Image (spheres, rainbow, N blue to C red):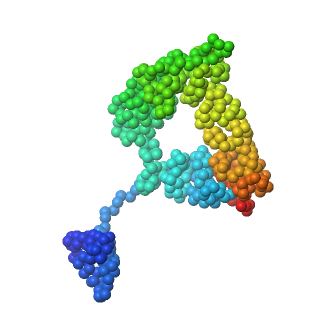
Amino acid sequence: MNGTSTRGDAAISLSSWEDLVTTALLGTDRRPLAAGASEASSASRTSAAGRSAPLALLDAAALATVRRRAGLRPARAARRPEPAPEDPRPALPAAAARRLALLLADRSGGAGGGRRGSSPDLMELLPQWLAAANGHGYAAPPQALPALLDAARGRTDLRPAALAFAGPRALWLARLNQDWRFALRAAPGGGAALPGPEDTEGVRRLWQEGLFAERVALLGALRARRPAVARELLASTWASERAEDRLMFLDSLRAGLSAGDEPFLEQTLGDRSRNVRATAAELLSGLPDSALAGRMAVRAAACVALDRSGNSTVIVVEAPHECDSGMERDGVVATPPTGRGERSWWLGQLVEAAPLGTWPERLGGRTPREIVALPVADGWQGELHAAWCRAAVRQGDAEWARVLLGVPSAPEAGGPGAVSLAERAKLLATLEPVERAAWVAGFIATHGLSEAFQLLGVCAVPWSAPLGRAVVDALDIARDAGSYPWSFSGVMGLAERCLDPAEATRLEGLLAMPDEREDAAPGAGGYWSEAFQRLVTTLRLRAAMAAELRPEEHRPAAGAPSVQSPDAVQPPDAAG
Protein backbone atom coordinates (compact mmCIF):
# COMPACT_ATOMS: atom_id res chain seq x y z
CA MET A 1 0.00 0.00 0.00
CA ASN A 2 1.13 3.53 -0.66
CA GLY A 3 1.06 6.35 1.82
CA THR A 4 -2.25 7.78 0.44
CA SER A 5 -4.31 4.74 1.46
CA THR A 6 -7.30 5.61 3.67
CA ARG A 7 -9.63 3.84 6.04
CA GLY A 8 -12.17 3.78 3.22
CA ASP A 9 -9.73 1.89 1.01
CA ALA A 10 -9.29 -0.67 3.80
CA ALA A 11 -13.03 -1.12 4.07
CA ILE A 12 -13.33 -1.57 0.30
CA SER A 13 -10.50 -4.10 0.40
CA LEU A 14 -12.21 -6.07 3.17
CA SER A 15 -15.53 -5.92 1.33
CA SER A 16 -13.85 -7.10 -1.86
CA TRP A 17 -12.29 -10.04 -0.06
CA GLU A 18 -15.64 -11.10 1.37
CA ASP A 19 -17.17 -10.79 -2.09
CA LEU A 20 -14.41 -12.97 -3.53
CA VAL A 21 -14.99 -15.66 -0.91
CA THR A 22 -18.74 -15.64 -1.56
CA THR A 23 -18.22 -15.88 -5.32
CA ALA A 24 -15.76 -18.75 -4.91
CA LEU A 25 -18.21 -20.68 -2.73
CA LEU A 26 -21.23 -20.15 -4.99
CA GLY A 27 -19.41 -20.32 -8.32
CA THR A 28 -18.90 -17.59 -10.92
CA ASP A 29 -21.84 -18.89 -12.97
CA ARG A 30 -24.25 -18.32 -10.07
CA ARG A 31 -22.64 -15.14 -8.72
CA PRO A 32 -20.64 -13.04 -11.20
CA LEU A 33 -17.46 -11.43 -9.98
CA ALA A 34 -18.11 -8.05 -8.33
CA ALA A 35 -17.28 -5.04 -10.45
CA GLY A 36 -14.67 -3.66 -8.09
CA ALA A 37 -12.82 -6.93 -7.87
CA SER A 38 -13.09 -7.45 -11.61
CA GLU A 39 -11.62 -3.99 -12.28
CA ALA A 40 -8.79 -4.66 -9.82
CA SER A 41 -8.08 -7.91 -11.55
CA SER A 42 -8.07 -6.25 -14.94
CA ALA A 43 -5.72 -3.54 -13.74
CA SER A 44 -3.22 -6.19 -12.71
CA ARG A 45 -2.95 -7.48 -16.26
CA THR A 46 -2.07 -5.86 -19.53
CA SER A 47 -5.22 -7.24 -21.06
CA ALA A 48 -8.26 -8.96 -19.64
CA ALA A 49 -9.64 -9.95 -22.97
CA GLY A 50 -10.45 -13.59 -23.32
CA ARG A 51 -9.99 -14.36 -19.66
CA SER A 52 -12.67 -16.63 -18.23
CA ALA A 53 -14.52 -15.69 -15.05
CA PRO A 54 -12.78 -18.38 -12.88
CA LEU A 55 -9.34 -17.13 -13.92
CA ALA A 56 -10.36 -13.55 -13.25
CA LEU A 57 -11.53 -14.63 -9.81
CA LEU A 58 -8.15 -16.22 -9.07
CA ASP A 59 -6.33 -13.09 -10.28
CA ALA A 60 -8.47 -10.94 -8.03
CA ALA A 61 -7.88 -13.26 -5.08
CA ALA A 62 -4.12 -13.13 -5.59
CA LEU A 63 -4.14 -9.35 -5.72
CA ALA A 64 -6.40 -9.07 -2.68
CA THR A 65 -4.15 -11.43 -0.73
CA VAL A 66 -1.11 -9.25 -1.41
CA ARG A 67 -3.01 -6.13 -0.41
CA ARG A 68 -4.23 -7.73 2.84
CA ARG A 69 -0.75 -8.84 3.82
CA ALA A 70 0.91 -5.59 2.88
CA GLY A 71 -1.70 -3.66 4.80
CA LEU A 72 -0.97 -5.22 8.17
CA ARG A 73 0.17 -2.69 10.70
CA PRO A 74 3.05 -3.54 13.04
CA ALA A 75 1.81 -4.57 16.48
CA ARG A 76 3.22 -3.44 19.78
CA ALA A 77 6.02 -5.74 20.91
CA ALA A 78 4.78 -8.32 23.38
CA ARG A 79 6.46 -8.80 26.72
CA ARG A 80 9.17 -11.41 26.59
CA PRO A 81 8.46 -14.56 28.60
CA GLU A 82 10.36 -15.10 31.79
CA PRO A 83 13.39 -17.38 31.42
CA ALA A 84 12.78 -21.07 32.02
CA PRO A 85 13.42 -22.08 35.64
CA GLU A 86 16.51 -24.04 36.55
CA ASP A 87 16.19 -27.76 37.22
CA PRO A 88 18.59 -28.64 40.07
CA ARG A 89 18.43 -32.40 39.51
CA PRO A 90 21.44 -34.23 38.02
CA ALA A 91 21.63 -34.55 34.26
CA LEU A 92 20.57 -37.76 32.58
CA PRO A 93 23.52 -39.94 31.48
CA ALA A 94 24.25 -39.58 27.78
CA ALA A 95 23.41 -43.20 26.92
CA ALA A 96 20.10 -42.92 28.77
CA ALA A 97 19.31 -39.67 26.94
CA ARG A 98 19.82 -41.40 23.60
CA ARG A 99 17.60 -44.24 24.73
CA LEU A 100 14.88 -41.79 25.76
CA ALA A 101 14.95 -40.21 22.29
CA LEU A 102 14.40 -43.66 20.74
CA LEU A 103 11.55 -44.47 23.08
CA LEU A 104 9.81 -41.18 22.39
CA ALA A 105 10.23 -41.65 18.65
CA ASP A 106 8.41 -45.01 19.05
CA ARG A 107 10.47 -46.72 16.37
CA SER A 108 8.82 -50.04 17.05
CA GLY A 109 9.17 -52.78 14.51
CA GLY A 110 6.06 -54.51 15.79
CA ALA A 111 3.19 -54.76 13.37
CA GLY A 112 -0.41 -54.09 14.20
CA GLY A 113 -3.07 -56.73 14.31
CA GLY A 114 -2.42 -60.28 15.37
CA ARG A 115 1.20 -60.51 14.24
CA ARG A 116 3.49 -58.06 15.99
CA GLY A 117 6.85 -59.19 14.64
CA SER A 118 9.96 -59.77 16.71
CA SER A 119 10.93 -56.17 17.52
CA PRO A 120 10.13 -54.72 20.96
CA ASP A 121 7.30 -52.24 21.36
CA LEU A 122 9.35 -49.29 22.52
CA MET A 123 6.45 -47.06 23.50
CA GLU A 124 5.20 -49.70 25.94
CA LEU A 125 8.57 -49.56 27.70
CA LEU A 126 8.43 -45.80 28.21
CA PRO A 127 6.40 -45.96 31.49
CA GLN A 128 8.97 -48.32 32.99
CA TRP A 129 11.85 -46.17 31.81
CA LEU A 130 10.25 -43.05 33.29
CA ALA A 131 9.67 -44.78 36.64
CA ALA A 132 13.33 -45.82 36.78
CA ALA A 133 14.58 -42.35 35.78
CA ASN A 134 12.40 -40.74 38.44
CA GLY A 135 13.71 -43.26 40.97
CA HIS A 136 17.24 -42.05 40.26
CA GLY A 137 16.15 -38.40 40.47
CA TYR A 138 17.38 -37.33 37.02
CA ALA A 139 16.35 -34.17 35.17
CA ALA A 140 14.92 -34.46 31.67
CA PRO A 141 17.14 -33.22 28.81
CA PRO A 142 15.73 -29.85 27.64
CA GLN A 143 15.66 -30.97 23.99
CA ALA A 144 13.44 -33.95 24.92
CA LEU A 145 10.73 -31.91 26.65
CA PRO A 146 8.53 -31.22 23.57
CA ALA A 147 8.41 -34.89 22.59
CA LEU A 148 7.87 -35.89 26.21
CA LEU A 149 4.92 -33.51 26.54
CA ASP A 150 3.47 -34.74 23.24
CA ALA A 151 3.69 -38.33 24.48
CA ALA A 152 1.98 -37.42 27.76
CA ARG A 153 -0.69 -35.52 25.86
CA GLY A 154 -1.58 -38.64 23.88
CA ARG A 155 -1.47 -41.08 26.81
CA THR A 156 -3.00 -40.05 30.10
CA ASP A 157 -1.41 -43.05 31.86
CA LEU A 158 2.01 -41.50 31.18
CA ARG A 159 1.22 -38.08 32.60
CA PRO A 160 2.13 -38.44 36.29
CA ALA A 161 5.54 -40.01 35.61
CA ALA A 162 6.25 -37.90 32.51
CA LEU A 163 5.48 -34.61 34.26
CA ALA A 164 7.48 -35.60 37.33
CA PHE A 165 10.46 -36.36 35.09
CA ALA A 166 9.98 -33.25 32.93
CA GLY A 167 10.07 -31.02 36.00
CA PRO A 168 9.47 -27.25 36.23
CA ARG A 169 10.57 -26.52 32.67
CA ALA A 170 7.68 -28.55 31.30
CA LEU A 171 5.24 -26.27 33.11
CA TRP A 172 7.08 -23.25 31.71
CA LEU A 173 6.64 -24.66 28.19
CA ALA A 174 3.00 -25.56 28.85
CA ARG A 175 2.20 -21.90 29.49
CA LEU A 176 3.46 -21.09 25.98
CA ASN A 177 1.69 -23.84 24.03
CA GLN A 178 -2.04 -24.45 24.14
CA ASP A 179 -1.53 -28.14 23.23
CA TRP A 180 0.33 -28.73 26.49
CA ARG A 181 -2.05 -26.94 28.85
CA PHE A 182 -3.01 -30.33 30.33
CA ALA A 183 0.31 -30.22 32.20
CA LEU A 184 -0.86 -27.17 34.16
CA ARG A 185 -4.14 -28.87 35.03
CA ALA A 186 -2.33 -32.02 36.14
CA ALA A 187 0.28 -30.20 38.22
CA PRO A 188 -0.60 -29.41 41.86
CA GLY A 189 -2.01 -25.91 42.00
CA GLY A 190 -1.63 -25.50 38.24
CA GLY A 191 2.13 -25.52 38.59
CA ALA A 192 2.21 -22.74 41.19
CA ALA A 193 4.01 -23.23 44.47
CA LEU A 194 1.64 -24.17 47.29
CA PRO A 195 1.96 -22.46 50.68
CA GLY A 196 3.33 -24.62 53.48
CA PRO A 197 1.27 -25.57 56.54
CA GLU A 198 3.09 -22.94 58.60
CA ASP A 199 1.96 -20.16 56.22
CA THR A 200 -1.46 -19.77 57.85
CA GLU A 201 -2.44 -16.66 55.91
CA GLY A 202 -1.31 -18.10 52.56
CA VAL A 203 -3.23 -21.31 53.19
CA ARG A 204 -6.37 -19.41 54.16
CA ARG A 205 -6.17 -17.10 51.13
CA LEU A 206 -5.63 -19.92 48.62
CA TRP A 207 -8.43 -21.98 50.16
CA GLN A 208 -10.82 -19.03 50.04
CA GLU A 209 -9.84 -17.59 46.65
CA GLY A 210 -8.07 -20.34 44.70
CA LEU A 211 -9.32 -22.31 41.72
CA PHE A 212 -10.80 -25.73 42.37
CA ALA A 213 -7.65 -27.56 41.20
CA GLU A 214 -5.52 -25.39 43.46
CA ARG A 215 -7.78 -26.07 46.44
CA VAL A 216 -7.69 -29.84 45.80
CA ALA A 217 -3.90 -29.75 45.57
CA LEU A 218 -3.66 -27.68 48.74
CA LEU A 219 -5.92 -30.04 50.66
CA GLY A 220 -3.94 -33.07 49.49
CA ALA A 221 -0.61 -31.49 50.42
CA LEU A 222 -1.85 -30.53 53.87
CA ARG A 223 -3.40 -33.96 54.43
CA ALA A 224 -0.05 -35.63 53.76
CA ARG A 225 1.78 -33.51 56.34
CA ARG A 226 -0.77 -32.28 58.90
CA PRO A 227 -4.03 -34.25 58.56
CA ALA A 228 -5.84 -32.37 61.32
CA VAL A 229 -5.14 -28.97 59.72
CA ALA A 230 -6.52 -30.22 56.38
CA ARG A 231 -9.66 -31.54 58.05
CA GLU A 232 -10.25 -28.27 59.92
CA LEU A 233 -9.75 -26.30 56.71
CA LEU A 234 -12.32 -28.44 54.94
CA ALA A 235 -14.81 -28.12 57.79
CA SER A 236 -14.53 -24.32 57.76
CA THR A 237 -16.22 -24.01 54.33
CA TRP A 238 -18.05 -27.34 54.12
CA ALA A 239 -21.59 -25.93 54.25
CA SER A 240 -20.99 -23.58 51.31
CA GLU A 241 -19.30 -26.08 48.95
CA ARG A 242 -21.04 -27.61 45.95
CA ALA A 243 -22.04 -31.28 46.26
CA GLU A 244 -19.60 -32.48 43.60
CA ASP A 245 -16.80 -30.50 45.23
CA ARG A 246 -17.67 -31.86 48.68
CA LEU A 247 -17.34 -35.38 47.28
CA MET A 248 -13.90 -34.68 45.82
CA PHE A 249 -12.69 -32.98 48.99
CA LEU A 250 -14.02 -35.79 51.18
CA ASP A 251 -12.07 -38.33 49.16
CA SER A 252 -8.84 -36.64 50.25
CA LEU A 253 -9.45 -37.87 53.80
CA ARG A 254 -8.58 -41.44 52.74
CA ALA A 255 -4.93 -40.50 53.16
CA GLY A 256 -4.07 -40.69 56.83
CA LEU A 257 -7.59 -41.69 57.91
CA SER A 258 -7.72 -41.89 61.70
CA ALA A 259 -10.05 -41.77 64.67
CA GLY A 260 -9.61 -38.00 64.75
CA ASP A 261 -11.63 -37.79 61.53
CA GLU A 262 -14.65 -39.57 63.01
CA PRO A 263 -16.54 -36.55 64.40
CA PHE A 264 -16.38 -34.73 61.07
CA LEU A 265 -17.35 -37.84 59.08
CA GLU A 266 -20.17 -38.66 61.49
CA GLN A 267 -21.56 -35.17 60.93
CA THR A 268 -21.21 -35.67 57.17
CA LEU A 269 -23.56 -38.68 57.33
CA GLY A 270 -26.37 -36.11 57.40
CA ASP A 271 -25.21 -34.45 54.14
CA ARG A 272 -27.87 -33.65 51.57
CA SER A 273 -25.93 -35.51 48.84
CA ARG A 274 -26.38 -39.28 48.77
CA ASN A 275 -22.93 -39.80 47.22
CA VAL A 276 -21.30 -37.75 49.96
CA ARG A 277 -23.16 -39.73 52.63
CA ALA A 278 -22.09 -43.02 51.04
CA THR A 279 -18.43 -41.97 50.90
CA ALA A 280 -18.48 -40.80 54.51
CA ALA A 281 -20.02 -44.13 55.57
CA GLU A 282 -17.38 -46.06 53.64
CA LEU A 283 -14.60 -44.12 55.35
CA LEU A 284 -16.13 -44.65 58.79
CA SER A 285 -16.51 -48.37 58.18
CA GLY A 286 -12.75 -48.44 57.59
CA LEU A 287 -12.33 -47.38 61.24
CA PRO A 288 -13.22 -50.57 63.18
CA ASP A 289 -13.73 -48.66 66.43
CA SER A 290 -16.00 -45.99 64.98
CA ALA A 291 -19.60 -45.62 66.12
CA LEU A 292 -20.85 -46.38 62.60
CA ALA A 293 -18.85 -49.62 62.49
CA GLY A 294 -20.42 -50.57 65.83
CA ARG A 295 -23.92 -49.86 64.54
CA MET A 296 -23.29 -51.90 61.40
CA ALA A 297 -21.89 -54.75 63.49
CA VAL A 298 -25.08 -54.89 65.55
CA ARG A 299 -27.27 -54.88 62.44
CA ALA A 300 -25.19 -57.49 60.59
CA ALA A 301 -24.89 -59.78 63.63
CA ALA A 302 -28.68 -59.77 63.99
CA CYS A 303 -28.90 -61.24 60.48
CA VAL A 304 -26.34 -64.06 60.86
CA ALA A 305 -26.32 -66.80 63.49
CA LEU A 306 -25.40 -70.44 64.15
CA ASP A 307 -27.90 -73.28 64.02
CA ARG A 308 -26.78 -76.34 66.07
CA SER A 309 -30.13 -78.15 66.01
CA GLY A 310 -29.22 -80.60 63.27
CA ASN A 311 -26.45 -83.15 62.88
CA SER A 312 -23.97 -80.40 61.98
CA THR A 313 -23.53 -76.74 62.75
CA VAL A 314 -24.59 -74.39 59.95
CA ILE A 315 -24.82 -70.64 59.49
CA VAL A 316 -28.35 -69.35 59.08
CA VAL A 317 -29.18 -65.97 57.56
CA GLU A 318 -32.22 -63.78 58.10
CA ALA A 319 -31.85 -60.79 55.79
CA PRO A 320 -33.36 -57.41 56.77
CA HIS A 321 -37.04 -56.95 55.98
CA GLU A 322 -36.74 -53.18 55.53
CA CYS A 323 -34.18 -50.43 55.06
CA ASP A 324 -35.02 -47.88 57.74
CA SER A 325 -33.88 -44.25 57.91
CA GLY A 326 -31.04 -45.12 60.29
CA MET A 327 -29.61 -47.61 57.80
CA GLU A 328 -29.86 -45.08 54.99
CA ARG A 329 -28.10 -42.45 57.10
CA ASP A 330 -25.28 -44.92 57.69
CA GLY A 331 -24.76 -45.37 53.96
CA VAL A 332 -27.04 -48.28 53.04
CA VAL A 333 -28.51 -47.71 49.58
CA ALA A 334 -32.19 -48.63 49.72
CA THR A 335 -32.88 -49.30 46.02
CA PRO A 336 -31.07 -52.36 44.63
CA PRO A 337 -29.67 -52.62 41.09
CA THR A 338 -31.80 -54.29 38.46
CA GLY A 339 -31.96 -58.03 39.03
CA ARG A 340 -31.05 -57.93 42.73
CA GLY A 341 -33.51 -58.67 45.51
CA GLU A 342 -33.94 -55.98 48.14
CA ARG A 343 -33.22 -58.13 51.17
CA SER A 344 -30.03 -59.69 49.78
CA TRP A 345 -28.89 -56.22 48.66
CA TRP A 346 -29.35 -54.78 52.14
CA LEU A 347 -27.70 -57.79 53.79
CA GLY A 348 -24.61 -57.49 51.61
CA GLN A 349 -24.15 -53.83 52.51
CA LEU A 350 -24.50 -54.48 56.25
CA VAL A 351 -22.01 -57.36 56.28
CA GLU A 352 -19.56 -55.46 54.08
CA ALA A 353 -19.54 -52.49 56.46
CA ALA A 354 -19.35 -54.50 59.69
CA PRO A 355 -15.86 -55.01 61.21
CA LEU A 356 -14.62 -58.52 60.46
CA GLY A 357 -13.76 -58.85 64.14
CA THR A 358 -17.49 -59.16 64.74
CA TRP A 359 -17.72 -62.71 63.43
CA PRO A 360 -15.42 -64.84 65.62
CA GLU A 361 -17.33 -63.69 68.71
CA ARG A 362 -20.72 -64.00 67.04
CA LEU A 363 -20.04 -67.45 65.59
CA GLY A 364 -18.82 -69.41 68.57
CA GLY A 365 -15.23 -68.20 68.88
CA ARG A 366 -14.22 -69.75 65.58
CA THR A 367 -11.29 -68.55 63.50
CA PRO A 368 -11.87 -66.97 60.07
CA ARG A 369 -10.86 -70.24 58.39
CA GLU A 370 -13.34 -72.22 60.48
CA ILE A 371 -16.09 -69.67 59.85
CA VAL A 372 -15.63 -69.73 56.06
CA ALA A 373 -15.63 -73.54 56.11
CA LEU A 374 -19.08 -73.69 57.75
CA PRO A 375 -22.02 -74.48 55.45
CA VAL A 376 -24.59 -71.70 54.99
CA ALA A 377 -28.25 -72.65 54.87
CA ASP A 378 -30.86 -71.77 52.24
CA GLY A 379 -28.48 -70.69 49.48
CA TRP A 380 -27.09 -67.65 51.27
CA GLN A 381 -23.44 -68.75 51.07
CA GLY A 382 -22.56 -66.86 47.89
CA GLU A 383 -24.07 -63.61 49.14
CA LEU A 384 -22.49 -63.88 52.60
CA HIS A 385 -19.04 -64.85 51.36
CA ALA A 386 -19.06 -62.16 48.67
CA ALA A 387 -19.84 -59.54 51.34
CA TRP A 388 -16.99 -60.86 53.49
CA CYS A 389 -14.71 -60.54 50.46
CA ARG A 390 -15.62 -56.88 50.04
CA ALA A 391 -15.16 -56.30 53.77
CA ALA A 392 -11.69 -57.88 53.68
CA VAL A 393 -10.69 -55.61 50.79
CA ARG A 394 -12.16 -52.49 52.41
CA GLN A 395 -10.54 -53.21 55.77
CA GLY A 396 -7.28 -54.54 54.32
CA ASP A 397 -7.54 -57.74 56.37
CA ALA A 398 -4.97 -60.18 55.01
CA GLU A 399 -6.06 -63.08 57.26
CA TRP A 400 -9.63 -63.02 55.98
CA ALA A 401 -8.46 -62.41 52.40
CA ARG A 402 -6.18 -65.44 52.59
CA VAL A 403 -9.02 -67.67 53.80
CA LEU A 404 -11.53 -66.36 51.25
CA LEU A 405 -9.07 -66.81 48.39
CA GLY A 406 -8.67 -70.48 49.19
CA VAL A 407 -5.98 -72.58 47.55
CA PRO A 408 -4.91 -71.58 44.04
CA SER A 409 -5.73 -75.03 42.70
CA ALA A 410 -9.47 -74.46 43.37
CA PRO A 411 -11.69 -74.00 40.29
CA GLU A 412 -11.27 -70.66 38.53
CA ALA A 413 -14.30 -68.99 40.15
CA GLY A 414 -14.94 -71.45 42.92
CA GLY A 415 -12.89 -70.41 45.92
CA PRO A 416 -14.58 -70.61 49.30
CA GLY A 417 -15.48 -66.93 49.20
CA ALA A 418 -14.54 -65.27 45.92
CA VAL A 419 -17.22 -65.58 43.30
CA SER A 420 -15.15 -64.16 40.46
CA LEU A 421 -11.56 -63.65 39.37
CA ALA A 422 -12.05 -59.90 39.71
CA GLU A 423 -12.80 -60.35 43.41
CA ARG A 424 -9.82 -62.66 43.79
CA ALA A 425 -7.60 -59.97 42.27
CA LYS A 426 -8.84 -57.46 44.86
CA LEU A 427 -8.27 -59.95 47.69
CA LEU A 428 -4.75 -60.65 46.44
CA ALA A 429 -3.93 -56.94 46.68
CA THR A 430 -4.24 -57.16 50.48
CA LEU A 431 -1.42 -59.75 50.71
CA GLU A 432 2.31 -59.11 50.79
CA PRO A 433 3.93 -59.16 47.31
CA VAL A 434 5.80 -62.44 47.85
CA GLU A 435 2.69 -64.30 49.01
CA ARG A 436 0.65 -62.72 46.23
CA ALA A 437 3.09 -63.86 43.54
CA ALA A 438 3.27 -67.39 44.97
CA TRP A 439 -0.53 -67.70 44.92
CA VAL A 440 -0.77 -66.54 41.30
CA ALA A 441 2.06 -68.88 40.29
CA GLY A 442 0.12 -71.78 41.81
CA PHE A 443 -3.03 -70.69 40.02
CA ILE A 444 -1.24 -70.60 36.65
CA ALA A 445 0.36 -73.99 37.25
CA THR A 446 -3.12 -75.46 37.74
CA HIS A 447 -5.29 -73.47 35.33
CA GLY A 448 -2.91 -72.07 32.72
CA LEU A 449 -2.97 -68.51 31.45
CA SER A 450 -6.44 -68.11 29.98
CA GLU A 451 -7.92 -66.84 33.28
CA ALA A 452 -4.79 -65.32 34.82
CA PHE A 453 -4.55 -61.89 33.20
CA GLN A 454 -6.40 -59.99 35.96
CA LEU A 455 -4.42 -61.79 38.65
CA LEU A 456 -1.07 -60.98 37.04
CA GLY A 457 -2.01 -57.31 36.97
CA VAL A 458 -1.83 -57.04 40.78
CA CYS A 459 1.60 -58.68 41.11
CA ALA A 460 4.68 -56.61 41.89
CA VAL A 461 7.16 -55.88 39.07
CA PRO A 462 9.54 -57.43 38.27
CA TRP A 463 7.81 -60.76 38.82
CA SER A 464 9.39 -63.10 41.33
CA ALA A 465 11.34 -66.05 39.95
CA PRO A 466 8.60 -68.65 40.72
CA LEU A 467 5.92 -66.51 39.10
CA GLY A 468 8.09 -65.79 36.06
CA ARG A 469 8.82 -69.51 35.60
CA ALA A 470 5.13 -70.35 35.90
CA VAL A 471 4.23 -67.85 33.17
CA VAL A 472 6.98 -68.97 30.80
CA ASP A 473 6.19 -72.66 31.36
CA ALA A 474 2.51 -71.99 30.63
CA LEU A 475 3.43 -70.14 27.42
CA ASP A 476 5.66 -73.05 26.40
CA ILE A 477 2.81 -75.50 27.02
CA ALA A 478 0.48 -73.36 24.91
CA ARG A 479 3.04 -73.36 22.10
CA ASP A 480 3.40 -77.14 22.26
CA ALA A 481 -0.40 -77.41 22.05
CA GLY A 482 -0.30 -75.68 18.66
CA SER A 483 -2.30 -72.58 19.60
CA TYR A 484 -1.71 -69.23 17.94
CA PRO A 485 0.36 -66.90 20.19
CA TRP A 486 -1.97 -63.93 19.79
CA SER A 487 -4.49 -65.83 21.89
CA PHE A 488 -2.04 -65.03 24.71
CA SER A 489 -0.96 -61.61 23.45
CA GLY A 490 -2.12 -59.86 26.65
CA VAL A 491 -0.05 -62.13 28.90
CA MET A 492 2.89 -62.00 26.48
CA GLY A 493 2.80 -58.19 26.62
CA LEU A 494 2.78 -58.31 30.42
CA ALA A 495 5.70 -60.75 30.38
CA GLU A 496 7.73 -58.37 28.21
CA ARG A 497 7.26 -55.60 30.77
CA CYS A 498 7.19 -57.60 34.02
CA LEU A 499 9.54 -60.59 33.74
CA ASP A 500 12.89 -60.19 35.44
CA PRO A 501 15.41 -59.32 32.67
CA ALA A 502 17.70 -61.98 34.13
CA GLU A 503 15.30 -64.57 32.65
CA ALA A 504 16.48 -63.74 29.10
CA THR A 505 19.28 -66.32 29.14
CA ARG A 506 16.97 -69.09 30.32
CA LEU A 507 14.51 -68.27 27.54
CA GLU A 508 16.99 -68.66 24.71
CA GLY A 509 16.07 -72.32 24.42
CA LEU A 510 12.58 -71.31 23.30
CA LEU A 511 13.74 -69.36 20.26
CA ALA A 512 14.19 -72.35 17.97
CA MET A 513 11.46 -73.20 15.51
CA PRO A 514 9.42 -76.05 17.04
CA ASP A 515 8.32 -79.13 15.14
CA GLU A 516 4.70 -78.55 14.23
CA ARG A 517 2.15 -81.13 15.22
CA GLU A 518 -0.30 -82.37 12.64
CA ASP A 519 -3.23 -80.84 14.52
CA ALA A 520 -1.46 -77.50 15.14
CA ALA A 521 -2.68 -74.26 13.61
CA PRO A 522 -0.86 -73.61 10.30
CA GLY A 523 2.25 -71.50 10.77
CA ALA A 524 1.81 -71.31 14.54
CA GLY A 525 5.39 -72.42 15.16
CA GLY A 526 6.79 -69.47 13.24
CA TYR A 527 4.55 -67.04 15.07
CA TRP A 528 5.61 -68.46 18.46
CA SER A 529 9.29 -68.20 17.46
CA GLU A 530 8.74 -64.51 16.68
CA ALA A 531 6.88 -63.95 19.96
CA PHE A 532 9.63 -65.53 22.08
CA GLN A 533 12.30 -63.66 20.12
CA ARG A 534 10.51 -60.40 20.88
CA LEU A 535 10.24 -61.40 24.55
CA VAL A 536 13.97 -62.16 24.83
CA THR A 537 14.94 -59.01 22.92
CA THR A 538 12.70 -56.86 25.11
CA LEU A 539 14.15 -58.34 28.31
CA ARG A 540 17.67 -57.57 27.08
CA LEU A 541 16.55 -54.08 26.17
CA ARG A 542 15.16 -53.56 29.68
CA ALA A 543 18.45 -54.76 31.16
CA ALA A 544 20.37 -52.31 28.98
CA MET A 545 17.99 -49.49 29.95
CA ALA A 546 18.56 -50.19 33.64
CA ALA A 547 22.34 -50.22 33.15
CA GLU A 548 22.27 -46.92 31.25
CA LEU A 549 20.31 -45.24 34.04
CA ARG A 550 22.61 -46.35 36.84
CA PRO A 551 24.81 -43.56 38.22
CA GLU A 552 28.41 -43.61 37.04
CA GLU A 553 29.76 -44.94 40.34
CA HIS A 554 27.45 -47.97 40.19
CA ARG A 555 28.22 -49.02 36.62
CA PRO A 556 30.47 -51.99 35.81
CA ALA A 557 34.15 -51.16 35.51
CA ALA A 558 35.77 -51.09 32.08
CA GLY A 559 36.33 -54.60 30.82
CA ALA A 560 33.79 -56.12 33.18
CA PRO A 561 31.07 -58.33 31.71
CA SER A 562 27.96 -56.40 30.76
CA VAL A 563 24.56 -57.08 29.34
CA GLN A 564 24.58 -57.48 25.58
CA SER A 565 23.13 -54.44 23.88
CA PRO A 566 19.70 -55.23 22.55
CA ASP A 567 20.56 -53.32 19.40
CA ALA A 568 22.99 -56.11 18.59
CA VAL A 569 20.41 -58.86 18.87
CA GLN A 570 19.48 -60.09 15.41
CA PRO A 571 16.06 -61.76 15.29
CA PRO A 572 15.89 -64.95 13.27
CA ASP A 573 14.06 -64.99 9.99
CA ALA A 574 10.36 -65.25 10.68
CA ALA A 575 8.65 -68.28 9.31
CA GLY A 576 5.11 -68.48 8.06
Which of these two is toward me, 24 or 413? 413
Q: Which residue is drawn at 75% across and 46% down?
A: 477
Q: Is residue 283 visible?
A: no
Q: Is residue 255 visible?
A: yes
> Residue 339 placed where, x, y %?
50, 32
- Position of residue 286 relative to residue 85, above or below, is above
Which of these two is toward me, 77 or 503? 503
Which quarter of the rendered picture does the N terminus lie within? bottom left
- Position of residue 162 relative to residue 245, above or below, is below
Picture quarter containing residue 575? bottom right
Looking at the image, residue 424 sits to the left or right of residue 81; the answer is right
Looking at the image, residue 55 sits to the left or right of residue 414; the answer is left
> Residue 440 placed where, x, y %?
68, 37
Q: Residue at x 57, y 59 (%)?
A: 105
Q: Residue at x 61, y 51 (%)?
A: 125
Which of these two is toward me, 324 or 220? 324
> Residue 373 placed where, x, y %?
66, 22
> Residue 64 placed where, x, y %?
30, 75
Which of these two is toward me, 203 or 179? 179
